[in-house]
Amino acid sequence: MRISKVTTKVGDKGQTTLGDGTTVSKSHIRIECLGQIDELNATIGFVCSGCRDDKLVGILQSIQNDLLNFGGELSIPDSNEILLSDDRLIDIENNLKEMNSNLPPLVEFILPGGDDFSSRVHIARTVCRRVERKIVELLEVENRTERWIQYLNRLSDFLFVLARFYTHKHEVDESQWNRSK
C-alpha cells in the first residue's frame, strides 16, 4: 500500500481507515497497537541518531524495517500474510548472543541510564515491552501468529543487552540496584 494522500479528514471524527479499507475508531485496540509500534520505531530512530557505530545502525535500521512490516501486517485484519521471516528472529537472537558473550554476568539489577546513548536504548526497551503487552492483549481477542510476540520479546532482550554492551565497550559506569536505599 502506498500513501499518496496524507490528509483524508476521516480522522477528524475519531475514525481511521485500515489497509483493507475498513473504517474503525481510533480507540480500537488495533490502532493502539499500530500507534505503539510506530512509537517504538521512532524511538529506535532516536537511538540510531545517537549511534556512531555503522554496524549497530545497520542492525537497528533492519529492526525499524521489521517494525514497518509488522505495522503493515496488522493494518490488514484478516490477512494471513506473514512479513516476518524466521531469519529475522534468528538474526536478533544471534546479535544478542554475540554482544552478551562479551559482557560480565549480571550480579544485580542495573539502573537504566549510564550515558545519553544507553539511556536512549533503555527507553526503547521499555517502549518495546509496552508494545509487547498491547500485542498480547490483541492476540487474546484475535487469532494471529505469535511470531511477533516472540520477536518483540527478543527485541527487548536485545535492547537490554545493547545498552549493557555499549556501557562496557565505552567504559561508562553501569550503576547497580542498591537494595538498601
Image: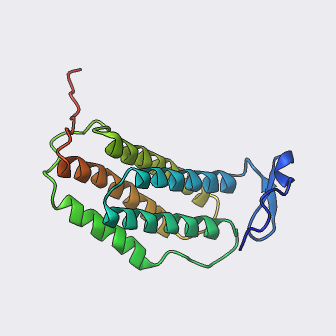
Count up the numbered dots: 0
Q: Which residue is drawn at 48% across and 69% down?
A: 147
Q: Quadrant of residue 24?
A: bottom right
Between residue 117 and residue 20, name the one nearer to us: 117
* Direction from residue 128 to residue 170 in the image, left or right: left
Q: Which residue is drawn at 23% across and 32% down?
A: 177
The residue most toward the front is 52
Residue in view at x 20 percent, y 41 percent: 172
Does 16 sit left or right of 147 as displayed? right
Nearest the viewer among 29 and 2 is 2
Q: Could you say where residue 160 lies in the image, as x and y percent from the top left?
A: 32, 51
Location of the C terminus (image quadrant): top left
Would residue 137 be seen by someone viewing this image from the given angle?
no
Question: Where's the N terminus, which quadrant?
Answer: bottom right
- Give the color scheme: rainbow, by chain, secondary structure or one colour: rainbow
Q: Where is residue 69 in the image (x, y as percent from the top left)?
A: 57, 70
Residue lying furthest top in this view? 181
Residue at position x 63%, y 69% from top?
72
> Where is residue 81 shown, x and y percent of the image?
61, 79
Asked if 125 appears above or below 61 in the picture, the reply is: above
Q: Describe residue 110's horizontal placement relative to residue 58 as left or right.
A: left
Is residue 173 rendered to the left or right of residue 93?
left
Residue 115, position as x, y percentages in the image: 30, 39
Viewer can see residue 171? yes
Quarter of image, res 174 = top left
